[in-house]
């Protein structure tokens, strides 16, 4: 049993990859960096069968949301939503000071992260080409 990346990209829509466990969809991404980082987190977690019911999907969400911490959360967003001023590596916080549910980032951080991913993809040379796992330094099988 293992995680695999399935290239779902096409010329008209560009990059898209799914991460699957034993050929069952777990999560999908429109950016190679997100795919790589999410796969690393999933491999640390083990397979879905290693988790209790309902916990696995919440933990996947929590870990994927942490990836947004690569950029700070400074507002306002394009729609005027405030940010929480969390720095790089810090979680977004509610006005009460508690971390947001499942670590969901605020809109300004999501917008900044999307801009950062576009710049990163250009720097990495990944436009519509799916990077090899070797190029990204990713182990794509989780031993059971």
Image: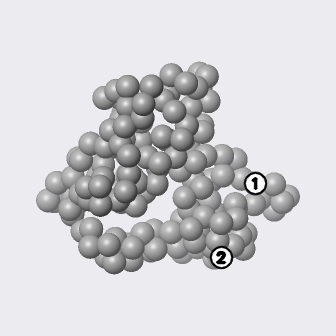
Which colour style is shown?
A: one colour
Work out whether residue 34 can be spotted: yes
The structure residue drawn at horizontal position 26% and vertical position 73%, both measured from the top left corner, is 125
Seen in the image, is 69 located left or right of residue 142? right
The structure residue drawn at horizontal position 66% and vertical position 46%, both measured from the top left corner, is 102
Disc 1 element: loop
Q: Position of residue 38 (x, y in %)?
A: 46, 49
Q: In which quarter of the image is the C terminus?
A: top left
Q: Where is residue 44 in the image (x, y as percent from the top left)?
A: 54, 41
* Image height of 12 relative to 79, above or below: above
Q: Position of residue 26 (x, y in %)?
A: 42, 36
Work out whether residue 21 can be spotted: no
- Asked which quadrant contains residue 127, the reply is bottom left
| Residue identifier under label 2 | 74
The structure residue drawn at horizontal position 38% and vertical position 31%, both measured from the top left corner, is 2
Q: Say which mark, if any, is on residue 18.
A: none
* Image height of 14 relative to 73, above or below: above
| Residue identifier under label 1 | 99
Tell which circle, 2 or 1, labels the residue nearer the N-terminal end: 2
Q: Distance between the residues labelled 2 and 1?
A: 16 Å
Q: Which residue lies furthest to the left in this view?
A: 11
Q: Do the residues labelled 2 and 1 touch (CB within 8 Å)?
A: no
């Amino acid at each position: 049993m293992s995680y695999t990346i399935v290239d779902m990209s096409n010329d008209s829509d560009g990059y898209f990859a799914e991460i699957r466990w034993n050929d069952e969809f777990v999560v999908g991404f429109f950016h190679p960096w997100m795919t790589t980082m999410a796969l690393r987190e999933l491999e640390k977690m083990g397979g879905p069968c290693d988790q209790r019911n309902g916990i696995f999907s919440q933990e996947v969400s929590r870990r994927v949301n942490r990836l947004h911490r690569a950029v700070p959360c400074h507002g306002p967003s394009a729609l005027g939503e405030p940010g929480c001023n969390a720095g790089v590596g810090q979680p977004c916080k509610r006005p009460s000071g508690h971390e947001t549910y499942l670590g969901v980032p605020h809109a300004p951080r999501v917008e900044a992260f999307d801009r950062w991913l576009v710049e990163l993809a250009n720097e990495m040379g990944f436009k519509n080409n799916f990077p090899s796992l070797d190029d990204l330094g990713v182990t794509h099988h989780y031993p059971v």
